[in-house]
Structure formats: C-alpha cells, structure tokens
Amino acid sequence: MPLLPVHSLFVPQFLSQTLSACLLCATITTIHCVLQAYHSIYTRDTMAPAAATEHVPNGAPAQEPVKTKCCHCKCTSTETNGVNGHDETKPEVGKATTTNGDTKPQDTPEDKKDEPTQTDKKTDTDTRDSATKDGDADTAATDDKDKAPEDQTMKCEFKHLDRRYDEKDEHYFTERKTEIDKPAQKDWWRLYAYCLVKHYNHHGEHDSTRLYVNPQPLRQLLRDVIGDYPSDPIDVDDVQIEAPFHSLFHYRKQLETEGSRRFADEAEAFEQFNLLMDWIKNHFEPEIAAYERCISGETRAISYEHAWTLLPPDTIVHCKILDQDRAFRVRRYYNEFDDHANLVGMTLSCRYIDFDGEDVGTLRSHLTFRKYTGVVQLSELDIVPLHLHEDANGIRETLLARGRKWEKHLGQHYVQYNGLAVIKKEMQGYARFGVNGRVMIDCATFHRLAADHSFTVKKLPSSKPKVPSLSSIKFTSETKEYDPLTDEQAMMTNATVRGYSFTNKRFLEFFVDKLEPIEWNTSCFDGLVLDPTIKRTVQALVSNHTRERPGFDDIVKGKGQGLVCVLHGPPGVGKTLTAECVAEYVQRPLYMVSSGDLGCVSSELDAQLTKIMDMTATWRAVLLIDEADVFLEQRALHDLHRNAMVSVFLRVLEYYTGILFLTTNRVTTFDEAFKSRIHIPIRYTDLTFESKLQIWKNFCGMVPGGVDIDERGLERLAEHDLNGRQIKNAVKAAESLASFEGVKLDLARLLQVTKIQSVFEKDLSSVTGVDYTAPGGRVRDADRRNMFL
C-alpha cells in the first residue's frame, strides 16, 4: 500500500522522542528509519489489528539486538538482521514474545498512549549513557594514543611493519599490506617484542629499515653491552637499531655471554633474549661463517663484502703511510662512492695520538679501504687489524719504540736530521724535501707561524701522575708536564714531528726515526783564527747575554736588549765562521739569512724580518744576516725606496732581544743611525802568513785518514795568497783528487790545486783578463788590459 504524506500521518507518543533524536543525524540511514516507522503505523491503523506472531523455535535463543551509534549524534541504534535502524527490535503491538515462543496479551497503544514505552525509556537512557561513554572514550583515546594496551601480553615474535606519514605529516605504523585507514592506536606495535620497521619519508620513498626492541630488559642489555655505538648509539628508552645492524654482529658474543647470565632466572626475558640471538645468527649466517674462517688461521683471507666484519669499533689497524708503519684506532666506517654513485670502497674514520703544541690528544684521520674482487689474503691488504697481521709482535715493538722517542720530543728540541721531510698540501698529498742539517722541533711555533697547517687535538683524559717534559735546549727555563702515554697510546702516535729546517728555511714535518742528537763542536772557538783580545771580548759578551740574569736595561722596557755585532772586512777572513763558532760555543741554533731572503720591498722586508726575529727570539738562536750592505748604507734624499728599507731595519733592530751578527764589506757607507746601535764592531784584515799557516793546519787536520805533509810543506802552502774560504776549498778539492787516484792526500796534490787557485785569483784581481788564444798560452799585456773592458 502506498505511503501517505507525512503531514497526514498520526505520530504516536512512543515515536516522538526517537524521531526528535534521529532528525539530528541528517543522514540517509535516519530518513530510511523514519519512513519505515511511518509505514508501520499506517499499516497498524488501517489493516487488521491482529498480526501473525513470529515464533522462535523451542530451545533456540532469541536474536539479540546489536546496538550501534549514529554517525554524528550520540544516540544508540540497534541492528538485527544486518539492517541499521532505530528501535527495529521493539515487540509488535499487542504481542509479547518470550524466550520459549509463547505469547501473552499486552495492552493496546491506546491504553498507554500518554506514557512512553519501555523501549523509549531505554533508548533515552542509552542515548545519555552512550554520549557520556563516547566522550570519555575520546578523551582516553587522546591521552593513551601513544601507549599500548596494558591488559595485553607482549608477543615474543618479530613483526614486520611500515612507518609512514599521513596527510597531517604525522607518522604511523602499519602492517605491510594495503590498508584503507591507518590504525587508530599508534603504539599497538609495542605488543610485539621486536619489530622490523621500514621507514618511509614524506614522499612515500623508502628511507631506512630499523629494528625496534620493545622489552625493557633487552633494551637495558643492549645499552650495557653495545652502548654508544659510533654510527648507531643505543638509547635505552627507545632502542632503534638501523640496518645493516652491524652493531649486533660485532657484539653478538658479548650479548650472548651477558644475556645468558643476566636472564637465567627470568623465563619471559630469557625467551625474548633467545629470539633475538636466533635472529642475529640467522640474519648474519654468511658473515659469521666468513669471519670465523678468516680468524681461525685456516685461510687468513676474506672478500671485500665481508671485510667490515674485521673492523668493529676500537679495533687497532695497521697500514703504511709515507713508507712508515702506522697504527690507528677505528671508530666507524661507511661506504664511499664516486661521482657516478659507484661504490669504490669503505672510508674508515680513525683516531691517532698527536701533539698540537699545547696538549697531547687524539686526532681524526680517514683511511680508504679500496674495493676489490674475490677473496684476498690479509697479508695483501693495505689495511689490516694489527692483531691479525702476520708480524704483529714485530710491528708492535717498532711502533712502541718510535712512540717513546716521539714522546721525548714534545716541546722545543734542536736536533740533527738527515733524510726526507714532508709538508701536507691541500688536496695534493704531501710535498717532499730533502733535509741535511740541524732542525728545530717546535710544534707550537709551527702552528703559530704556519697557521695553514695548524690543528687542535682532543685532549687525553688525565689519569696518571704528570711527568715534566724538559726541552733539550739548555737555555729553556720553561717546563710543561704531560701525562705519560700507555703502550697502546705510544703505538698510535704520529710518525712525524713538526718543526723548522734552518737549511731549507721551511716549516716541515720530520720523521721521528731520523732525529739524532747534535754533536756540538765545543772546541771550534779555539780553532778560530782571530785576534785573542777580540775573541775574548766576543766570548764575554755572548756568555753574559745567555745567562738570563737581570742586567742593564734601557729606559723604555724591552728596548735595546739584544746583542748586535758587526763583522766587517774582506771576504774569506772568518766573519761567517765567527758567528758559527759563537753558536757552537753557546750551543744554540744558528739562523743564517742573506739580503735576498729578506726581499727588496719595504713591506716584504718588514714582514720577513719580523717573522725571522720572532723565531730566533723564541728559540734563543744566533741570527746572522750575511752581506747586509743594502740595509746598512746611508740614506739619501733621492732614494725613497732604500730609505724605507733602512728605516724598517733600524726599527726592528732596536727591539730585537737575541744575538745578531751583521757581516759587510763596505763599512764606510754605514748610515749614521746604525753606529749607535752596534754593541761591538769587529774589523777583519787580510790574513797574515801566520794566520794562513794556522788555517792550513786546521783544515788538514780535519781530513779523514790524515795528510802526508810536514811543517815545511805547510809553510809552502801558506805562501800562496789565499783567504780562509779558498784554503778550505783547496783542501776539499785535493782530498777528492787523492781519493779518485786511490792514494793518500799529500803535499803534491795540495800544491797542484793551490797553484790552480792562485792563478785564478790573480786573473780576477787583474784589470785585464787572459787571452787563452795567445801563442804558447802566454798572456799578452795588451790583451790583458782589454780583456774586461
């Protein structure tokens, strides 16, 4: 029968409250329920009052209504035969159904039309209760969204999950399957002991895979055993171990030992622990097999894919750098790729012991473990764990001996060096220099004046009584205490120390095994051919200046505290030798520099001279400026450039605190201002016969194997007009000639070289030259006069 219009229907009292509540939903389901109710009323009023009673078979349970909630409001509806509606389970009018199928008469609606039905009362109550419960449920869900249900037992299993982001940029966990909605409970995954979770970024791309460890006892175990793993530290409150899970491989044996002891009496924790250990063994089965074969001694070989198994954190590895044995402590490793994203090897982030001029500590270094194919013997690898090296004991002894020698050279040390020295270039490896001479080991000055190569170490923790490290330079009054290194630390020290080469005029790194103590020539001052009075004066001034005792000072503090000596005279009479003998006498470094080293521009001269005097003052060295004529000449009005250079030299000279020797051949051109700044001028004249005789005796006595010559022979040699430098060159040349002929050096060969030298000196001192084309090789006087015109 067709439905009547809504306005023509009589709406009874028992349906008014239900309609009022449901109209608030404004959904299609609610409208359908209202139409069904109208249809039932119309049928009841127009059709026969008695309807067939629905019987339930005896013994069969009555169908229980299922309560549901509307989408928007808090009213309660029920569902019986899979159809949603409101109050669909109320009994038919005039009948009451019992559990055994019997019926009994009920009052008609007209009898109770003014009072609500039992169903309506229940609906009102359910609506209020449902609203209250739903509000509490929403609040509870908000408060506990990050907590797993407490009434559920954790499952001892591995769960594979995905961690993604929703449209609100909030992450959530889901099982690895297609799902329409994300789970409402964010931490439901904590009900599983272990979860292997794939992390996805905001673009839905796979980012990483992590193992989540949920049992608290297992978290604490991992924290205690693994701790702060360099690339994946353990946080006891939230253990997330990132793939490839190398920390679990490296510490698997320690975990097994400690876990078996710790959880022996805890059944649940022991079960969870065994599950983790079984997973580790299964996951790393190939790696464990390759590692055991390598360290067992049977093969001593490993593939590149499994080489990382030999490099747990804190492993000491051996390699050669600049042909020097080195030991490093590995902190972490990671893959290295080229510009085309191709794997080229592993980069090992390591630590070693170094000195920055202030502290002894660790410094970072990166070693490259190149990729290779196949299985390779450990002896063929460039980087090998020290304990697996075929000559581990021998290398340990070498490294330890060198480390103790390195430790002794902390601070300032003036030493002899003969070998290769290096300096690191930016992106170009090392530059190499041959050094044969004396060097100053001083890392602090190296860092201060060669700042491009400076660094800072991470200071070692102080745990032992400090020992003083005294400088080998006698004049040093400063001492600094350093902790003695352990044997392991000594093995990991750098192979080089930093300092300055006086022959190369460079800051360089010197290999420790090439450092040798200096053999001072304390008797060289006795062999210096100089007027005894002048010699004693120089000795007195130098000795007094090196005593470091309070003495006469200038009115302005720090001014005029140096010792300035001017040595003037012809070449080869002992000016430079005097400065060298003074340095040997006081056992101090000698810094020799010429005007060419200082530059010819005033700004350049100022910078270079300031730097050099800074170094020599720091090391208390003797400074010799050879051929200083250009800086000492008198100033003139027309030459502003040279005037500026002289002014710079005067200013720097005034505040120099060390010993300075200036040599010149033109004392008559001195600027007037220099005369008052010179403490002792020493004049050298041409050598006398007695002086030359003594010089011949000195140099002949220095020839290895001696010289076959008597006193008369020495006198014949002294008759030649040669200066001291020429005599030295003649002895050296004659010794080479005798060695070539395989005979002992004698007078004949000395005379042979001396005559050649004398002829050359006469030719140079003559106004004219030699005409080598003259008949018989004779020199014509006319040609001699025109030779150099």
Image (cartoon, grey):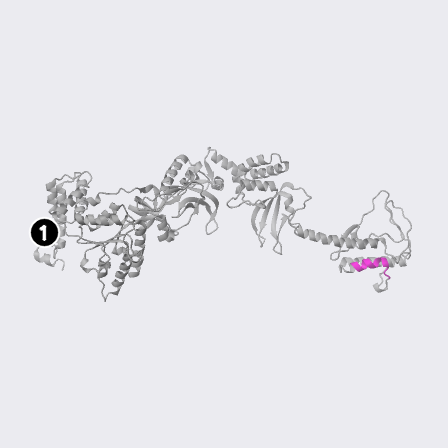
Q: Is residue 382 above or below residue 111?
A: above
Q: Quadrant of the C terminus?
A: bottom left
Q: Which residue is mark 1?
A: 777
What range is drawn magenta here?
A: 10-21
Q: Is residue 738 above or below residue 789?
A: above
Measured as percent of width and height from the top left, residue 573 is found at 17, 50
Q: Residue furthest bottom?
A: 638
Measured as percent of width and height from the top left, residue 177 is found at 64, 48
Q: Quadrant of the N terminus?
A: bottom right
* Dominant secondary structure (helix, strand or loop) of the stretch shown in magenta: helix
**Res 718 seen here:** yes
Q: Between 774 and 291, which is closer to the camera in this rendering?
A: 291
**Res 76 seen here:** no
Look at the image and say whether residue 651 sits in the magenta stretch.
Answer: no
Q: Between 103 and 717, which is closer to the camera in this rendering?
A: 717
- Other-residue count near label 1 (Cα within 10 Å), few / some / many at <14 / 14–19 / ≥20: few
Look at the image and say whether residue 11 sits in the magenta stretch.
Answer: yes
Q: Amino acid at mark 1?
A: Gly
Q: Between 9 and 393, which is closer to the camera in this rendering?
A: 393
Left or right: 754 in relation to 400? left
Left or right: 165 in relation to 489? right
Measured as percent of width and height from the top left, residue 717 is found at 12, 45
Q: Between 669 and 547, which is closer to the camera in this rendering?
A: 547
The total of numbered circles placed on residues is 1
Measured as percent of width and height from the top left, residue 617 is found at 31, 52
Residue 566: name its quadrant: bottom left
Label 1 residue SS: helix
